[in-house]
Image: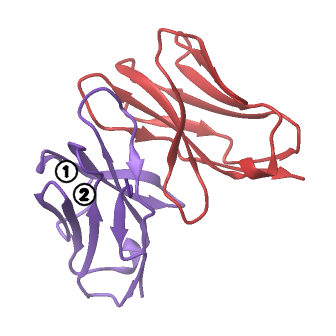
Chain colours: A red, B purple
Amino acid sequence: QQQVKQSPQSLIVQKGGISIINCAYENTAFDYFPWYQQFPGKGPALLIAIRPDVSEKKEGRFTISFNKSAKQFSLHIMDSQPGDSATYFCAASYAGGFKTIFGAGTRLFVKA
Amino acid sequence: DAGVIQSPRHEVTEMGQEVTLRCKPISGHDYLFWYRQTMMRGLELLIYFNNNVPIDDSGMPEDRFSAKMPNASFSTLKIQPSEPRDSAVYFCASRTGTGSEKLFFGSGTQLSVL
């Protein structure tokens, strides 16, 4: 119930293409769903986040799609660039708690 | 702001030795978290503190692991004795208590136990 399942484990996309990473959760008490981006040798950094009262959130080339009934959410990176090559983590936390549970991560490589 | 500061960046030690990892959170942040990252298990929450008090240590793998936060600007994670399976990247993160759920991570400590 505390898990967040993320797929795929790795992803290779051509420059200009769309990168899609998916996550699923079980605990319906989760109410905050962030995505973190991590470059080699660095700590994860918040990229974008969503709450379950909206179905989509867009910030620049990054979009979160959220399906509350299916308990799934995904990250879409439009016009993917080589600089987007990094590891992406989905995560979840719930109201009243301060623990953030992370997915296993997706290694994205954008080919120039 | 300098962000979350961790030291050392790299630590290489031999099995059985004591290892101490250090963290300075962002000033004003009420919560401090210790995470461990491995290829097999991803990012695991080990323990977190609120106002210097340990709140949840259910992620601490064994009694060999201990963490302290003697004041608002300093925390340590200690492993004694260390084992090769403890090799991982250890991250410290901090956040405010209200207004934002954003976690701010340090750059991590790469620990290798030989």
User: Where residue B27 sits: x, y (%)?
Assistant: 25, 50
Q: Quadrant of residue A47?
A: top right
Q: Farthest residue toward the bottom?
A: B14
- Secondary structure of the residue carrying tag 2 is loop
Q: Amino acid at mark 1?
A: Asp
The disc label shown at residue B60, or none? 2
Residue at horizontal 42%, vertical 65%? B108
Q: Quadrant of residue B80?
A: bottom left
Whether residue B107 is situated above or below residue A96 in the rendered picture: below
Q: Total number of numbered labels?
A: 2
Identify the subunit bearing mark 2: B
Q: Is residue A48 left or right of residue B79?
A: right
Give me the C-alpha separation between circle 1 and circle 2.
6 Å
Whether residue B3 is situated above or below residue A28 in the rendered picture: below
The disc label shown at residue B18, or none? none
Q: Is residue B108 left or right of residue B29?
A: right
Identify the subunit bearing mark 1: B
User: Where residue A25 sits: x, y (%)?
Assistant: 48, 27
Identify which residue, B107 or B46, lies in the foreground: B107
Q: Quadrant of the C terminus of chain B?
A: bottom left
Residue at horizontal 73%, vertical 30%? A61
User: Where residue A86 sits: x, y (%)?
Assistant: 67, 52
- Secondary structure of the residue carrying tag 1 is loop
Few, some or many residues within 10 Å of mark 1 (<14, 14–19, 20+) = some
User: Mark 1 and 2 residues: CB-CB less than 8 Å, in contact?
Assistant: yes
Q: Amino acid at mark 2?
A: Met
The disc label shown at residue B57, or none? 1
